[in-house]
Each structure stands twice: as structure tokens, then as C-alpha cells.
Image (cartoon, rainbow, N blue to C red):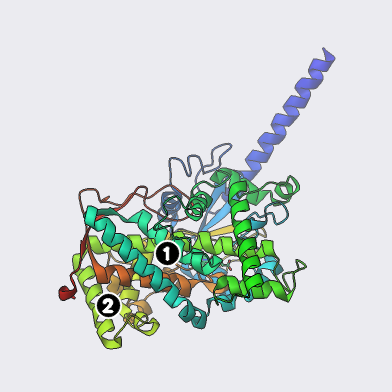
Amino acid sequence: MSVLNGLVAVLIILVSVIYWYLKKSFSYWQSRNIPCNEPLIPYGNIKGLGKIISFVHFTQTYYTQFKGTSKFCGIYFFTRPIALLLDLDLIKHILVKDFAIFNDRSFYYNEKDDPLSAHLVALDGKKWKEVRSKLTPTFSSGKMKYMFPTITAIGDRLIDYLNDANKLNDVLEMKNILARFTMDVIGNCAFGIECNTLKDIDNDFYRMGRMAIQKPRHNPRISFLLNDYKRLARFLGIKTIRDEVSTFFIDVVRNTIGYREKNNIQRNDFMDLLIKLKNENNDGDVSKGLTVNQIAAQSFLFFVAGYETSSTTMLFTLYELALNQDVQKKVRHEIQNAMRKHGEFTYEMMMDIPYLEQTIKETLRKYPPFTTLRRTAQRDYKVADSDIVIEKGMSVVVPVFAIHNDPDYYENPEIYNPDRFSDEEMKKRHPMTWLAFGEGPRNCIALRFGMMQTRIGLITLLSNFEFSTCSQTPIPMIFSSSPIVLSPKDGVYFNVKPIKTEEI
Ligand code: HEM
């Protein structure tokens, strides 16, 4: 009887402690007078996230509900409080002015057991700073010029592919085709490999690249937990990248490095620069050089960060141009003018089409590939003109998609209008109303490269084909619930008509 009493007492204490812990955790925002929604045990506010509710819909709902009531609102990711920023000036402070306090994203990575996970997006502190400054020269405009012909050659293959496919069918599904185009580009520039996924449907690069993005090792909720319990997860040796994906990419990098060094091959691509960094020192100290695993991690990141972001940007542009034929005609006209002016398709010609740039920016406004940005406070941070403190360790989220589609900043945001990005119009807006490439010292390192491959793809496509909607085009667009890159749920079909040379 006394044993039973003891057990009951222990149980009561345990339940009381859990109750006290949950009560305390779930009153974090209320006790600080920060607007939030009632949490639900044990999920906090994220029940159904990634399954029933997409991440885009989730953040937009919070943004719309609380904007104007406070500089940020609170969300509980399980018991973890997270701040969703609602005020553009505060966003500017966090991303740019006070970057020293918000320089990390606090993502989980495990360099020892899962080397590919230790890439630039996840690295923190001194390591991030060292790797970022070493990789920055890889993306200079000089390097972009050097890579330009490689990408236009892949563009030619894209046109050959479309011409062949178009002979069989007027209606083409472009999501898959464009993913293969950008995969060939990044495979070539980041790994120096002719993956040719446009021709070879079952290519390993294609399979592994898709797997890395579409079938992550853990579901989003486990990933949130890993971000919160990094030390424990590292101690337990938990990995985030699937073993077959890891083995494939590390082998490819090892073989490429071996082959280039043995045959003394220099191609002036990303891989070349990474090999030079390796040879500065390879004892694992990133302040000196990079190891093979560190090179593999960065190339892997270029691959996954680089192909889907740009392919969806091209895809959503074609989608909007198919819906807005007047804009399509205008972009094509500008491309043809630039072609006449420069005589051929050169780097300079590509950079001399302002309306194309406006079009891409408008696409990235409506469909930013990364719908949120994330930073973590390295110490307590007092929000200017208020008595609110963002505490050390707190993650803050910038709701990019919601800001880009806010009617207060973009009138009738659902309307596609590249004129919003003329120089005059851009000057009228707060700089934090367009965050497609992020902002501040931790913005997208490859902005130039991403824009270049998107420009090349679109110039090539629009010079050769007209795109219009067909009965299978998804109208309105339905997004996939994938939390990584904003993309259409299913394939996107277009009526594709070749342009005859005499029409140009
Ligand atoms: C249209 C194309 C692209 C878009 C819209 C895009 C967007 C972004 C965004 C929003 C971020 C986060 C920035 C922040 O937190 O402030 C980012 C980071 C990053 N992107 Fe891109 N990206 C694109 C293409 C690429 C390509 C082609 C590559 C590689 C070849 C790449 C490599 C990276 C890397 C390495 C980071 C992490 C930077 C750091 O933490 O220091 N991106 N990108």
C-alpha cells in the first residue's frame, strides 16, 4: 500500500511539474503583453503545420491578424516562443543595423556525423564568417561573366529539347523541364559535371537533388525540435541528410577533385575556387582552408539552394506571362531590341534589359522562393522606442511572402505588374518591402548567379517560344505545402508555340 502511495505521489509530482512547465512556457507572450494566439498542448500554435496548413498560409494568417497592433507577434512552436516581425523598421534593424546581435539562424547541423549539413546556411558564429568571406569571391561579377557561356550552352540544349518535345505535343509541363535546366547549370558550375538531366531522365543527380529537397530525412516538426536541442542532437549523432544523398554528393566531390588535380584541369567555376581554398590548408580549420567534406557541404548547398529557387522563379514568370500576354509581348520586344543593339547574346546584352529585370523582381515579389527569413538573438535586445526585449536565444522570423503581398505596400498585390519595379516606383517604397534575396550581411551570397541563370533561361525561352495557358494550367495557382521552397503543388502546363524566325 505504501509503495502504491509512493508511486501515486511521484505521479502527482510529475504531472504537476509538467503542468507547471507547460503553463509557464505557454504564458511567455501573454505575460509580456505581446499579441499571440492561444496555444494547444503539446503543439503550441503549430498543429497541422506542413500537413493541413502550408507554412506560407500560416505566417500570412498571423501577419494579417496582428499587423498594426505591435512591432511583432508571438508564436509557440511547441513550447518554444518565436517572434514574427511585423514592423519594417524593426526588420531593418535586425537584418542590417543590428546584424552583430542577429548574425545566426540557429539551424541544427552536425559536422562530425553528417558533414554535408555543415553548410553556409546553417553555420554560425566565427565559422560562418570565415566560410562566407572565403566563398564571396566565387560570386563576383567577373566570375559570372566567365560562367556565362557555360549557361548559354545549356540554354541551347533546353531549346533543342523543347523543339523536340513540341513536335509531339503543343502542351508541355514546364516545372520539371525548368528544374532539369537549372540542375544542369548548377551541376556544371558547382560540380563541374555534365549531368545532362534534360536528356537523361533517370540521372542520379536529378534523383538525389530531388530527394534532398523533397524527401528530407525528418518532418518539419522534428526539424524544429532539432533546432531547439542542438547539443543533445549532436551528442546522439542525429543526422539531417539522408545517407544515400550524403554518400552520393561526397563521392562526386571527392572524384571531381581527384580527377582535376591529377589532370591539372582548371575551369574557373565554383569547384575550382573551392579546390584552391582546400589547398591553402586542409587540417579542418576553416580560418585557413577547406577540407574535402567542407567543400562537399558548400557544393551540396549551392546545388540545393541554387536549382529550385531559380527554376521556380522562371516557372512563375512564364505562368504570369501566359496570363498577362501584354507583359509577355513587352518583355519579348525588349529582348529583341537589346539583341539588335548588341548584335548577339552576350553578358552585356543580358544586363541591358531593364524591363526583364523588373519582370523577374515582380515574380519574386509575388512568389518569393523563401517565404520567410530567420535570425536568432545572440544577446538580449531592447526594441527601439518600446520597452519590449527580445531575449537572448529567441528566434525571429521575417514574413517575406506576407510583406510582398501586403496591399499597404503593393496596391492590388494579386495583380502582376512589373512597372512596380521601375527606379521611380522602387524609391517610393521602404527598402524592406522587397526581401526576395534577404537583406544585410547574411543575404543570398549568390544573388548575381541566381539572377543570371534566371535571365539567361527566360531570354532563351522567350526568344524562341510563346507561352499561353491551356485547360490544364492551374488557375489559380496552388502551392505545395513543402516548407523549403515555394513551388506549385503539381505540374504547370502551358501551350507552347515556336516563334518563326521571320516573326522576330
Ligand atoms: C532566384 C534565385 C535565388 C533566390 C530568390 C535566393 C534567395 C535566398 C534567400 C532569401 C536567402 C536567405 C537570405 C537571408 O537570410 O537574408 C538565401 C541565402 C543563400 N543562398 Fe540564395 N537564392 C537564390 C539563388 C541561389 C543560388 C543559385 C545559390 C548558389 C549557387 C544560392 C546560395 C545561397 C546561400 C549559400 C545562402 C546562405 C547565405 C549565408 O547564410 O551566408 N542562392 N538565398
Q: Is residue 68 above or below residue 137?
A: above
Residue 159 visible in rendering:
yes
Disc on res. 335: 2
Residue 394 visible in rendering:
no
Q: Is residue 296 left or right of residue 461?
A: right
- The percent position of residue 237, horizontal first and vertical second, equals 72, 47
- The percent position of residue 143, horizontal first and vertical second, equals 51, 79
**Which amino acid, by three-letter code, is at mark 1?**
Ser
Between 409 and 495, which is closer to the camera in this rendering? 495
- Please tell me whether mark 1 sits on a helix, a strand or a loop: helix
Q: Residue furthest right?
A: 2
Q: Is residue 17 above or below residue 177?
A: above
Disc on res. 70: none
Q: Quadrant of the C terminus?
A: bottom left
Between 473 and 255, which is closer to the camera in this rendering? 255
Residue at 48 percent across and 64 percent down: it is 194
Q: Quadrant of the N terminus?
A: top right
Disc on res. 310: 1
- Please tell me whether mark 2 sits on a helix, a strand or a loop: helix
**Which amino acid, by three-letter code, is at mark 2?**
Ile
Q: CA distance from mark 2 to mark 1?
A: 19 Å
Disc 1 CB within 8 Å of nearest ligand 1 atom: yes
Among numbered discs 2 and 1, the one appearing first in the sequence: 1
Q: Is residue 209 above or below residue 334?
A: above
